[in-house]
């Protein structure tokens, strides 16, 4: 991998990574809302916050159940997705003071910290979410993003792979982020293969096609930077030309 290209690639892919960080899956078919963490009707995607819900719906549930941590987590997520980060944090903060905050609370705090750019804090919250529930694939995803943003690429790769192994539903955002992580480490062939697999799953995802183009373009050799073998070839060509010039001078 060419050094200049790799550095450029890392910067561009870091931006792409954060843009696809924590979007929830499309909402499932309408059904009676789950309003308690103790409810047996809550699925893992619901418990981990992997459902995009309307702000007015989650606000209504939260106002009816202000002491319910699950309702608060869902409301905070909807607030964050609407751009109201301060209010989202204010909803979650009281539950952080509890004896055993739920994995969703930690996950959403991690997602909030990603939004504000505090990646070290995001990592800390993601690890707490995983400690509370090791199966929380969304927390593993947040962890991967936070580590990648800190240039801890091998650790981030492990987190992304764990998230992908556990993921339920639309896994393309995780595949995309893992591919960007691999590309930033110089594993462009693996990255492209993963992106092609994601494209096969859903050809309509424009971010996948965009990242394929970015990686393919930036992975091309540059006239201003060559690898070791290219440098050797250049020297060999120069030496051959010099030898020809010497032969010309010797010829009467």
Image: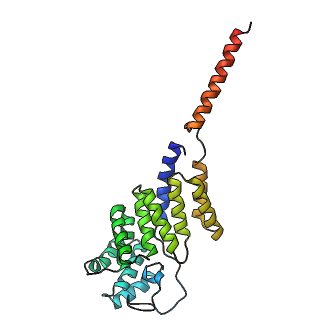
Picture quadrant where residue 38 is located: bottom left
Picture quadrant where residue 247 is located: top right
Picture quadrant where residue 94 is located: bottom left
Which residue occupies 44% across, 63% down?
A: 145
Which colour scheme appears in the figure? rainbow
Residue 119 on image: x %, y %: 36, 62
Return the residue nearer the eye: 119 or 178: 178
State left or right for residue 222 relative to residue 92: right
Which residue occupies 34% across, 70% down?
A: 125
The extreme right residue here reads: 252
Return the residue nearer the eye: 93 or 168: 168
Residue 170 on image: x %, y %: 55, 74
Which residue occupies 34% across, 62% down?
A: 120
State left or right for residue 160 relative to residue 96: right
State left or right for residue 154 relative to residue 120: right
From what the image shows, is residue 211 above or below residue 81?
Answer: above
Q: Is residue 202 visible from the viewing direction of this image?
A: no
From what the image shows, is residue 6 above or below residue 147?
Answer: above
Quarter of the image where the C terminus is located: top right
């Amino acid at each position: 991998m060419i050094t200049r290209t790799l550095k450029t690639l890392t910067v561009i892919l870091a931006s792409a990574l954060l843009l696809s960080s924590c979007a929830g899956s499309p909402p499932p078919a309408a059904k009676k809302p789950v309003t308690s963490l103790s409810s047996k009707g809550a699925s893992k995607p619901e418990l981990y916050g992997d459902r995009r819900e309307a702000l007015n719906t989650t606000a209504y549930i939260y106002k009816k159940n202000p002491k319910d941590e699950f309702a608060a987590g869902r409301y905070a997520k909807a607030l964050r997705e609407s751009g109201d980060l301060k209010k989202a944090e204010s909803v979650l903060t009281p539950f952080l003071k509890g004896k055993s905050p739920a994995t969703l609370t930690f996950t959403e705090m991690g997602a909030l910290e990603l939004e504000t750019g505090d990646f070290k804090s995001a990592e800390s919250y993601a690890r707490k979410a995983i400690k509370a529930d090791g199966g929380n694939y969304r927390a593993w995803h947040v962890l991967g993003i936070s580590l990648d943003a800190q240039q801890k690429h091998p650790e981030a790769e492990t987190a992304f792979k764990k998230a992908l192994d556990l993921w339920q539903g639309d896994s393309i955002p995780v595949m995309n982020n893992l591919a960007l992580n691999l590309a930033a480490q110089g594993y462009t062939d693996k990255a492209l293969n993963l992106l092609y697999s994601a494209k096969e799953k859903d050809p309509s995802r424009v971010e996948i096609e965009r990242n394929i183009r970015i990686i393919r373009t930036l992975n091309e050799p540059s006239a201003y930077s060559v690898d070791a073998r290219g440098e050797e070839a250049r020297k060999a060509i120069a030496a051959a030309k010099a030898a020809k010039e010497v032969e010309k001078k010797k010829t009467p």
